[in-house]
């Protein structure tokens, strides 16, 4: 990189800053002479704390203000939790690094009154126990699995949600992402990891990403060295699934992906808001090898193809295309089986709730 200071956009929360600083540290390992300046800002999702995310009516709740700053040149790159990025990005912007994924699963965190019993699970909580989460995906799956539980919205950053859990007697437990808890150093608060048979996770959950302009080729070549090939391919297929389903924060869409021995498998699920309707589809594709290209190939590139809004100049374009096609194929099958109607009904119900707020 040249001597220009790279300006990095980030949300203001403690978790966002931990994640941004972790990505910068990785970039400094690649080029110790590189310098960075962090610019923080609040997004719509940060500012509106009394309404469920699914009822706010925006698809870019945690990214819009940052992307405006990227577009007008105030910043050069943004560090995101990839699950917060819409499946379609603004023109001339792309995801140019996908870092190695932390555990993507959901976790149950118990109120202190229950935490003394290490064997407590969602299944063993007493009937009528209130579980805090604003995720329609989590609620739909857990209502289906544990009809004896009640669910209530809980908003705020990680610190705020844990405080709301601990300082009142409203919730018996809350559901959070394992990745965020671990990055904050709070892994010891996890009472139960929700495996895919309990709750499929959100698209790209647990992965960090960098967003840049597509015309900044020097920065793209530098940042894309952070790509973790397995995570990248899994997130390409998961994001293609979500985009093809036309899903977002108002859609109960879950996923699970595995890449082993060049076999990429993707499970997608669509549910009604109450969990009574449930569609799932799993497909597998064999990826061409080698998946990782030699550095010379990347150095010689002058233009880049995007897959699920991700540029991976150091990854086989055939493998990226196969991953994207897999997500589209799984979504197509779900649509054939009735996903279109389920998602339309979920959006209608969420819009109705938003109008009553």
Image (tube, rainbow, N blue to C red):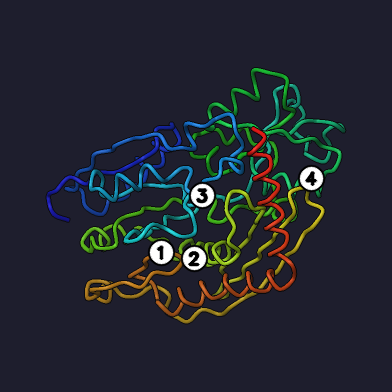
Dots 1, 2 in contact, CB < 8 A: yes
Rendered residue at 43%/75% (across/down): 291
Distance from Cα at disc 4 to Cα at disc 2: 29 Å
Around disc 2, counting alpha carbons within 10 Å, would you say few (fewer than 14), some (14 to 19), or many (20 or more)? many
Q: From the image, tell me which residue sits under label 3.
A: 59
Around disc 3, counting alpha carbons within 10 Å, would you say few (fewer than 14), some (14 to 19), or many (20 or more)? some
Distance from Cα at disc 3 to Cα at disc 1: 18 Å
Distance from Cα at disc 4 to Cα at disc 3: 25 Å
Report helix, strand or loop for mark 2: helix
Q: From the image, tell me which residue sits under label 4.
A: 143
Rendered residue at 23%/42% (across/down): 36
Q: From the image, tell me which residue sits under label 1.
A: 310
The quarter of the picture where residue 8 lies is top left
Viewer-proximal residue among 66 and 269: 66
Residue 226 screen position, x and y as percent? 35, 58
Around disc 1, counting alpha carbons within 10 Å, would you say few (fewer than 14), some (14 to 19), or many (20 or more)? many
Viewer-proximal residue among 345 and 64: 345
Report helix, strand or loop for mark 4: helix
Q: Which one is closest to the eye, mark 3 or mark 1?
A: 3
Residue 75 drawn above or below residue 30: above
The quarter of the picture where residue 242 lies is bottom right
Rendered residue at 74%/67% (across/down): 338
Relative placement, left or right, of 281 versus 329 is right
Distance from Cα at disc 1 to Cα at disc 4: 34 Å
For marks 4 and 3, the one nearer the N-term is: 3
Residue 337 drawn above or below residue 225: below
Residue 155 drawn above or below residue 65: above
Residue 236 disc label: 2
For marks 2 and 3, the one nearer the N-term is: 3
Relative placement, left or right, of 185 versus 8 is right
The quarter of the picture where residue 96 lies is bottom left
């Amino acid at each position: 990189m040249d001597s220009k200071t790279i300006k990095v956009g980030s949300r203001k929360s403690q978790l966002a800053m931990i994640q941004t600083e972790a990505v910068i540290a990785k970039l400094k390992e690649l080029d110790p002479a590189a310098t960075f300046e962090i610019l923080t800002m609040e997004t719509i999702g940060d500012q509106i704390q009394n309404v469920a995310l699914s009822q706010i009516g925006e698809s870019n709740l945690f990214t819009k203000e940052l992307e405006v700053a990227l577009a007008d040149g105030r910043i050069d790159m943004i560090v995101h939790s990839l699950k917060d990025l819409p499946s379609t990005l603004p023109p001339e912007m792309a995801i140019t690094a996908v870092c190695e994924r932390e555990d993507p699963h959901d976790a149950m965190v118990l109120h202190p009154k229950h935490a003394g019993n290490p064997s407590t699970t969602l299944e063993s909580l007493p009937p009528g126990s209130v579980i805090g989460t604003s995720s329609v995906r989590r609620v739909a799956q857990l209502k289906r699995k544990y009809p004896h539980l009640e669910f209530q919205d809980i908003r705020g950053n990680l610190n705020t949600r844990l405080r709301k859990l601990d300082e009142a007697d409203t919730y018996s437990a809350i559901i959070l992402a394992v990745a965020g808890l671990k990055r904050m150093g709070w892994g010891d608060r996890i009472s139960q990891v929700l495996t895919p048979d309990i709750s499929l996770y959100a698209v790209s959950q647990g992965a960090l990403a960098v967003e840049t302009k597509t015309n900044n080729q020097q920065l793209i070549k530098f940042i894309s060295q952070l790509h973790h090939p397995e995570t990248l391919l899994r997130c390409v297929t998961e994001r293609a699934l979500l985009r093809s389903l036309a899903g977002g924060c108002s859609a109960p869409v879950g996923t699970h992906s595995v890449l082993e021995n060049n076999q990429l498998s993707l499970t997608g699920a669509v549910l009604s808001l109450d969990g009574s309707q449930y569609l799932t589809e799993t497909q597998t594709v064999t990826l061409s090898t080698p998946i990782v290209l030699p550095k010379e190939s990347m150095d010689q590139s002058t233009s880049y193809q995007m897959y699920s809004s991700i540029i991976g100049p150091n990854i086989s374009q055939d493998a990226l295309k196969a991953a994207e096609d897999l997500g589209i194929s799984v979504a197509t099958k779900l649509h054939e089986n009735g996903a279109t109607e389920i998602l339309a009904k979920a959006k209608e119900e969420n819009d109705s709730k938003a109008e009553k707020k």
